Image: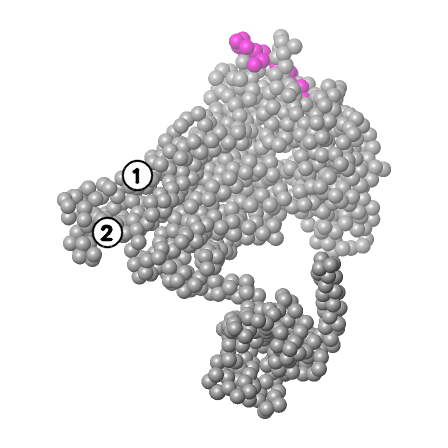
Amino acid sequence: MFRRKRKASDFNDEIESHLRLETERLREQGLSEDDARAAAHRAFGNVTQAQERFYEAGRWLFWDHLWQDLRFALRMLRKSPGFTAVAVLTLALGIGANTAIFSLINGLMLRTLPVRDPGQLVELLERGPGDPEPGFNEFSWDAYRIMRDGNHVFSDLFIGSTMNFFPVRADKLQPQTVFGGSVGGTFFQGLGVRAAAGRLIGPEDVHMGDHAPVAVVSWSFWKSRFNLDPGIVGKKIVVGNDAPLTIIGVTQRGFYGLSEHAKQDIWWPRSLGPSQGRGFPLLARLERGVSIEQARAEMTVLFQTAMNAPDAGLFAKGTKLRIEPAGDGVSTPLTQMLSTPLTVLMATVGLLLLLACANLAGLLLARGASRQHEMAVRACLGAGRGRLIRQTLTESVLLSMTGGALGIFLAYFGTRGLVRIFASGRQIAGAPVHFESLSNPDGHVLLFTGAIAITTALLFGAAPAIRACRPIPAQPPQSAARIGESKSHRLFGKGLIASQVALSLVLVSSAGLFVGYLSHLRNLNLGFERNNLLLVTLDFAHSGYNAAQFPRLSQELVMRLDAIPGVSSATFSSLSPMEGPGAGASAFAEGHPEKQTQASINYIAPDYFETYGTPLLAGRDFSASDQVGSPVAIISEAAARDCFGNENPIGKHLTLSHINNSTKDEITYEIVGVVGNAKYNDIQQPAPPTIYPDLLQQGFSGSQLAIRTKIDPDGVASAVRQTEAAVLTTVPIVRSMTMNEQIDSSIVPERLIAMLSAGFGALGALLAAIGLYGLLAYTVARRTHEIGVRMALGATRSDVMRIALYDALWMVCAGLALGAPLAFWGKRIAASLIPGLSVASPLPIVVAAAIMIAVGLIAAYPPARRAMKVNPIAALRHE
Amino acid sequence: MSTQEDKERLELLQGTLDLLILRTLIFGPQHGQGIARAIQQTSEEELLVEHGALYPALQRLEDRGWISAKWGTSSNNRKARFYSLTAAGRRQLGKETTKWKRLTAAIGRILESEGS
């Protein structure tokens, strides 16, 4: 249908032949040559119309016009390369930012799992007060039993898979870190996953308190590591440091566990019954016809029962059950870390794109005014209103599509940059996350980008299109260029500027809020000195050293480290602050057996407090002689207050009770010192009561080496590495970073939000400035004559300049008035998403308003100056 | 385009031109001017066919595959485009004729019942 079989000239020939035949026939009837020809024409009717109908019937007119419009739009855009470049770049940044954030959301949260009926799959989460969103999937055995047996809303409620990464070893294989997990007996059955080889883990492999030593691997692991060896069933594989497992089967091709970015490659069975360390992750399938809300309602009640069960020790008071859809993957450390920042950022980039729309609408309107003449000519030549609208919209869509294509390109590199920041997050450091899959745009992303590009084009193209559809004034076209603008049109242009200022105010003030919050976090008093501190993590697991050798080796290492120039002290501990999850225990103070204090634990070597810069408030540090004495501990000020109130704790005793699997360990320590409070594993939480037992005395190997330096810690890093390798020859260094880097890795979401919102805020302000500049420059150019008259009548140059600047200031102030409520509203939303964000201070909004006024005046200055330099004589002579 | 003479003729009903063209071609290949002439003569000058409307209609029928066209020479030795009925066109003519007859019969019955 696109290509006509018959040429128009052939059709015209036919008409010509018809007229000739008809003329001849009429002449035969006795008419003169001229009369016959006229009569033939008369009988034929409108020749042009026949030709047009032939033309229109021969093709799809829609495509034909589209092609015309496109070619024309391309020509118009090529004619003004400056405008085109600014517009395309603006769109590319706006659409690119949206694409980047969306592609992360898509990659992290919107990839449907390759399981049976993913839409029915839900995960159960419990969230105690103070727990991070969305909570944890760790339920006690009793809670599982009660919820499984008592519910009417699930067709199946089964134990899911833990999500961890482990070094995995097998015969003839290089050790490799992979995601794996222990699963319940009905895990694969519940998901509807089949075996590609052998069999999968079934109910027969799990028992109360025990499980069969078997494992199942993924198809991709089978392919990449075993080259699809059919003899895989029966092979032994070692996960972590546990006993070897026998591989019994391979999952179906394409199955990767419960999260697309944390693809699991190995699963083994999970022992059943109470007190199996961490809780059970639970998954369920909704009964047909049951909505997730119904399930939530019923399960909330059941969960209350479960919390009163004897085994419910894991639950704190006020813990709430949550049921979330899991068809697009379960929540993982990565989604937990990123879901809030991505939500905030998606809102931010949405506003940015809206701002870009307002900006372009303004630019296009100004351009439209200068094209009034052209439009008038087109209308006079017979272009219908619909055709004019279509043509302006085609130009907008073309701009937007070009911007969108460039935006996808920018987004690709943008997401790769962002992914690098995520990867530094301590929650996922070292995890074999498939980050590439996040930045590669898939069909969803392209569809999203196309949709926003078109929506954007309609938004910013609407104003010029509506203008094109206004009745064309009946003046002769040549004067159209001088027609004054209508008042409503001028107001609309100013309104666009004001709305850009308003949106920029929201962007800049929220950026200020987030940057302020980040700098607040970076300047918090942590209870230790964060600068000039190098942290080195060691791995003793396969070193061959035993714990008894550790005190001597560690002392030798510390001595040699102290000797490195630039190092002032060094120490060992079991944990370093902000490293990640810590350890805790219940503490009972001597004389107060009824009072239980939840305390954080860190085993430390001598000189820990000196190295970290935490003040010793009372008592003494550990010494070498403690290693042979009775157990001693140092406690923090908060622990002293919680356990002993106002009594002096030095010399008193404290009993720590740990729950290790099913056994309960109790050790009583004599308190020898009290130190200042220090943050433990979260800089946003208050310093918890902390107890520091003596590492060397307890016979542990401290894997955390801390070195206090007098110079930049990076300057001593290589010397530290060499010294460590010389003393602990078989102990590899797993990680080496400064304390500041470690803190940064614990606040990745806050850093991401602050950094990106600052960038987007700056971009927003820049766009508003361009918009303001453009409008003023255009206005001044149009009002040259008026300015000339004013000056001729006695206005001074500074008067003229003041008029232009006042004009700009007015628009900015209107925008600020419009934007302030929005900014306050945005602040409240931000506060609801980010706990701890302080929103009481109006400072960010005030500062943002000041910035916008400054930006407005700077943008207005060049046009105002141009207005001032108008030569009245030249301006009037021009008339 | 209308002259006094034309005004007395009947305007064609929508869609009937196709039927008339197909019918005319049943007697053998014919060029456009011949078709127009044939329709006028056969209808005893009762029907008004604007010649200009004929050609887009011919093109439409050709696109649908009901007629085929070829340039040839007319009886008085002029170049002209000759149309002939295809097998599909013949079938279409049968269908359209039946439809037309049913339609006119039905309308006729109504008009007669009202007249009585």
Residue A428 falls in which quadrant of the image?
top right
* Chain ID, mark 1: A
Foreground mark, 2 or 1? 2
Judging from the image, what secondary structure is the residue with disc 2 in? helix
Q: Identify the magenta region.
A: A642-660
Residue A213 locus on image (x, y percent) = 80, 39
Residue A740 screen position, x and y as percent: 48, 35
What residue lies at 57% left-to-right and 26% top-to-bottom? A604
- Which of the chains bears the disc numbered 2? A
- Image vertical order of residue A434 relative to residue A425, above or below: below
Quadrant occupied by the C terminus of chain A: bottom left
| Vertical placement of residue A100 versus A6, above or below | above
Residue B47 against residue A529 in the figure, above or below: below
Give the alpha-carbon distance from disc 2 to disc 1, as whole Å: 20 Å
* Numbered circles on residues, count: 2
Instruction: Decide if residue A559 is on the left or right side of residue A370.
Output: right
Q: Which picture quadrant has residue A715?
A: top left
Residue drawn at point x = 19 percent, y = 54 percent: A875
- Left or right: A397, with A362 as reference point: right
- Residue beneath disc 2: A784
**Which residue is tagged 1?**
A809
Amino acid type assigned to the residue bearing label 2 in the image? Thr
